Amino acid sequence: MAKRIEAKRALLGAALVLVAWGCGSESGEGGGTLPMNENPAGTGGTAGDPPMTGAGAGATDAPVAGMMEPGDPPVGGTGGAPIDDPMDPPDDMMMPPDDEPAEWPDVRGGCPGLDSGFLGDEACIAPPAPGEGIQIHIGPNDYDDPAQIAMFSLEAGEEVSECWTYHTPNTEDVYYQGWTLSGRPGTHHIFNSMLNVEVEDGGGFKICIDPGTGTSPNRIGSLPAAGKPYMPRTRVAPENVGVGRALAAHTSAEADLHYFNITEGQVIREFWLNLYFIPKEQVTEEGLEVRGMGGLSWSILPIAPGTDEVYKYECPIGSDGRITGLAGHYHAHGKRQTVSIRRANGMREQLFEMYNYDNAAMFAFDSISANPPMMAGVDGARSGPLDVFAGDVLEWECHVINDGSVGLTYSNNVQNGEMCNVFGVSIGPEINCVLP
């Protein structure tokens, strides 16, 4: 314990630069779930077997709606009408449901008695109140057990992406509507996939059943994920109060934990995920997973050193509906990611642009969320509900500069791997493409 406390003190100065993409178990080996709790809010998603379809790379030229330069008025509302203040919602934005706070509080620091001796105890969040949801916890349940610490620890300079298998703790089929995910420092991403095969609860980290390519036939959908250490619960817009995500009892799942340790001491791979229930009788629409994965061909033909290129991808939208939220994902050699909708009439509406791979934002598109405006060099997005129609196309592109000395493959390696992915939630259409 004394060694860990000394290491913890040495690591505090580096804690704030550790980044990411999303209180104990019943297992003696650590990890697991807590079957106690529920609540509402946020944007989530589920999906069946994702169709391996897509129009391929290379978005066509089209007029752009929503692009801004510094000094331009911010874009708000579905049609891109300017608003006076990016922090004030457009006039047609509505108030959240009466039983929700204006903002959900930061719930980190919810385990005041936790003193593990490792960096990041404040990341622990308390489970939802009984009857309001469940908590999934992956990490040690005994910080004085050397065997558990050996499973979850990461030494200075190490980077690894491995999977931990588990079953969700719900004893019956449920729907959830909101979620919060909190991970210790060192989190780059946490991807939770639902599976159609039986898995072991814990037992150590393993090679992922789905290797991060989305191509495994055993992957049947997603649970909430993170692209940074903390993903807070968000409000439910009035038009989304009936949206739920289905979760079957004791669902087989795996958590892909991508961690890197840039400190001089040990860190622990650990996260807490709260899912907040919505009663089945209140569910009128089901959220579906939006998934666009680009760059898989880089595993065969890596991005060569010296390359400076914009990689473009697109995915068709086959039916009418709406997108309630999106988030981008790329690595250290990515300089910019831009996501747009190309309408059936050829008009292109820019949805968001991000420049920070290590602080990925999730942008909500609804009647109560005001996103920061889009300006060159600054993360931002359009605001307001986002309706989509059959014949529209989801486009995304990543500007990658390989200024390193090795080729970049499609892999979970922050410095020597790259990705160009977009994730989110839709109501109505399945938007799911895995592209080279």
Image (cartoon, rainbow, N blue to C red):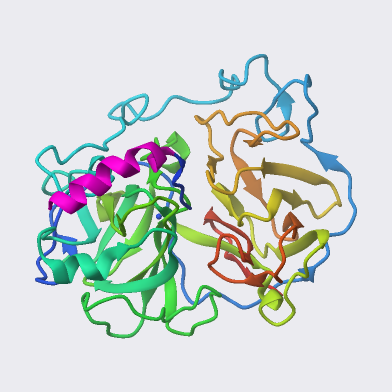
> In front: 239, or 434?
434
Q: Is 198 situated above or below 157?
A: below
Q: Position of residue 173 (x, y in %)?
A: 23, 66
> In front: 340, or 212?
212
Q: Is 14 situated above or below 341?
A: above
- Residue at the (36%, 82%) spot, across then down: 196
**Left or right: 388 in relation to 161:** right
Residue 2 part of the magenta-drawn span? yes
**Left or right: 16 in relation to 129:** right
- Residue at the (54%, 26%) spot, across then down: 93
Q: Position of residue 210 (x, y in %)?
A: 46, 78
- Where is residue 109, by image quadrant? top left
**Left or right: 63 in relation to 232:** right
Q: Residue furthest toward the top? A: 84
Q: Which residues are magenta?
A: 1-16
Residue 69 part of the magenta-drawn span? no
> In front: 165, or 149?
149
Magenta stretch, main secondary structure, is helix
Q: Please identify the quadrant where the C terminus is shown.
A: bottom right
